[in-house]
């Protein structure tokens, strides 16, 4: 084990997340949607101003951000790193590493890691490609506790391409998806990693769960190997589950929720397709409204905007950006202007980063796609990580680099 760190400011912590921070996978609300930020409506053909760029290391880990510090993960040879970077300069504040060698994985698409760190009070929660979970001191990177999730929870679903679902915070607990008998979902104490509850026996899938509120009830929506499940995040009790089967159990995209209509949309590639599930006012009694294969979001983020879902539809080959009406499943349009990409929404603007490095600013509506600005080759290597927007700064990763762009 090796740890390097520079002097770092110690920040006061709170469980209340300011809107300008990006504390976890999917941002403050876990759905890649932010309040309106004062970003420009256009930019030069070369793209927005680059504030800094640096080589980081291999991986698709997302970028968590709090109070001027970025937290992410990467791989270098047989080591895996968690790192804190100065948001203004990109310089390393601290990093900590551990050996990630072990049984053979299918790393044909890269050695990982895949998860996004979780910022929770005074610590950073990370999960590596071999399901090593660590709590790190936010100011110094000191390892406070570690768990080997596969060994500590025997029979967990071991992912052959590496562990993928990111941890989720609920109140003062960490929710972790593992799959396996009686511990498909586990709640832990961030102080010491102690298990608060462990329940259910469905198989794991790469998709990260999301917390939603239905009426006054908090619900954790989680994709599993062959279903979508809804849990009470406080107790872990199952509220309902609904079939959503894909080839190989690869439900990768986080479910979407339409407030007001209480409709859950789940979409997957590998034959999974999409379906709309309407809930009763108390978040129970799921009723399938529609299902089809016209929307098959692979591993990228999708958005729900005013009763419509938008996402890149396709696993291999063309992946047109697609708009589907949530109530009916009607495909409103498909547009092949861009290749497969991740979406982040702020106000009435949507940021798209494609896997081949094109950055675009879009206006999405049921009537169609309007391109406000576009810049090609913002990144040069495979860009599978969703960007993080904090204020007017966009933090972007490709497979080996990280950069900051000014969207003012």
Image (spheres, grey):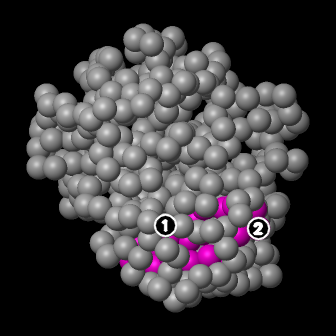
The answer to whether one can see residue 287 in this image is yes
* Magenta span: chief secondary structure: strand
Pointer 2 residue: 348
List the residue tagged with mark 1: 405
Give the extent of the magenta segment: 342-362
Q: State the image coordinates of residue 167 (x, y, percent, origin top left).
A: 47, 34
Single out the mark in the foreground, 1 or 2. 1
Residue 146 location (% of width, % of height): 29, 20
Q: Secondary structure at mark 1?
A: strand
Of 274 and 71, nearer the camera is 71
Q: Nearer the viewer, residue 326 or 303?
A: 303
The answer to which image quadrant residue 73 occupies is: top left
Q: Give the residue displayed 55% in from the left and 24% down from the top.
A: 13
Query: Is residue 117 rendered to the left or right of residue 364?
Result: left
Q: Was residue 175 drawn as part of the magenta stretch in this picture?
A: no
Mark 2 is surrounded, within 10 Å at the Cα level, by few (under 14), some (14 to 19) or many (20 or more) other residues, namely few
Q: Is 344 in the magenta?
A: yes
Residues packed near mark 1 inside 10 Å, few (<14), some (14 to 19) or many (20 plus): some
Residue depicted at 68% across the width and 43% down the height: 19
Q: In which quadrant of the rendered view does residue 43 lie?
A: bottom right
**Whole-percent x and y of residue 202?**
48, 32
Residue pictured at 51% horizontal, 11% vertical: 196
Asked if residue 208 can be seen in this view, the reply is no
Total count of labels: 2
Drawn side of residue 277 relative to residue 173, left or right:
right
- Give the quadrant of the N terminus: top left
Q: Compute the Cα span from label 1 to label 2.
A: 20 Å
Tell which circle, 1 or 2, labels the residue nearer the N-terminal end: 2
Where is residue 387 shown, x and y percent of the image? Answer: 49, 59
Residue at 59% of width from left, 44% of height from top?
21
């Amino acid at each position: 084990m090796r740890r390097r760190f520079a002097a770092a400011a110690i920040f006061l912590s709170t469980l209340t997340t300011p809107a300008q921070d990006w504390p976890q996978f999917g941002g403050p609300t876990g759905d890649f949607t932010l309040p309106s930020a004062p970003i420009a409506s256009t930019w030069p053909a070369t793209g927005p101003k680059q504030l800094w760029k640096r080589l980081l290391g291999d991986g698709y880990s997302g970028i968590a951000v709090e109070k001027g510090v970025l937290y992410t993960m990467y791989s270098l040879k047989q080591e895996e790193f968690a790192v804190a970077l100065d948001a203004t300069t990109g310089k390393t504040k601290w990093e900590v590493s551990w050996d990630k060698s072990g049984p053979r994985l299918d790393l044909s698409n890269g050695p990982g890691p895949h998860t996004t760190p979780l910022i929770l009070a005074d610590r950073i929660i990370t999960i590596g490609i071999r399901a090593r979970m660590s709590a790190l001191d936010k100011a110094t990177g000191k390892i406070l506790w570690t768990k080997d999730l596969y060994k500590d929870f025997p029979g967990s679903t071991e992912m052959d391409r590496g562990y993928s679902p990111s941890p989720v915070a609920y109140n003062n607990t960490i929710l972790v998806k593992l799959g396996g008998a009686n511990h498909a979902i586990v709640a832990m104490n961030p102080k010491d990693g102690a298990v608060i509850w462990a329940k259910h026996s469905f198989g794991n899938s790469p998709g990260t769960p999301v917390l939603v509120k239905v009426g006054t009830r908090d619900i954790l929506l989680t994709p599993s190997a062959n279903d979508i499940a809804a849990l009470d995040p406080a107790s872990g009790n199952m509220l309902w589950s609904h079939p959503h089967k894909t080839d190989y159990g690869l439900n990768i995209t986080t479910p979407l929720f339409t407030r007001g209509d209480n409709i859950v949309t789940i979409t997957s590639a590998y034959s999974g397709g999409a379906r709309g599930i309407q809930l009763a006012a108390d978040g129970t009694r799921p009723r399938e409204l529609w299902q089809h294969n016209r929307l098959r979001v692979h591993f990228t983020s999708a958005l729900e905007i005013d009763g419509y879902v938008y996402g890149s539809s396709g696993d291999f080959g063309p992946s047109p950006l697609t708009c589907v009406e949530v109530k009916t499943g009607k495909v409103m349009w498909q547009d092949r202007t861009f290749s497969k990409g991740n979406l982040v929404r702020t106000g009435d603007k949507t940021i798209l980063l494609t896997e081949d490095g094109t950055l675009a600013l879009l206006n999405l509506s049921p009537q169609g796609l309007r391109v406000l600005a576009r810049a090609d080759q913002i990144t040069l290597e495979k860009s599978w990580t969703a960007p993080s927007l904090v204020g007017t700064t966009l933090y972007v990763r490709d497979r080996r680099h990280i950069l900051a762009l000014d969207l003012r």
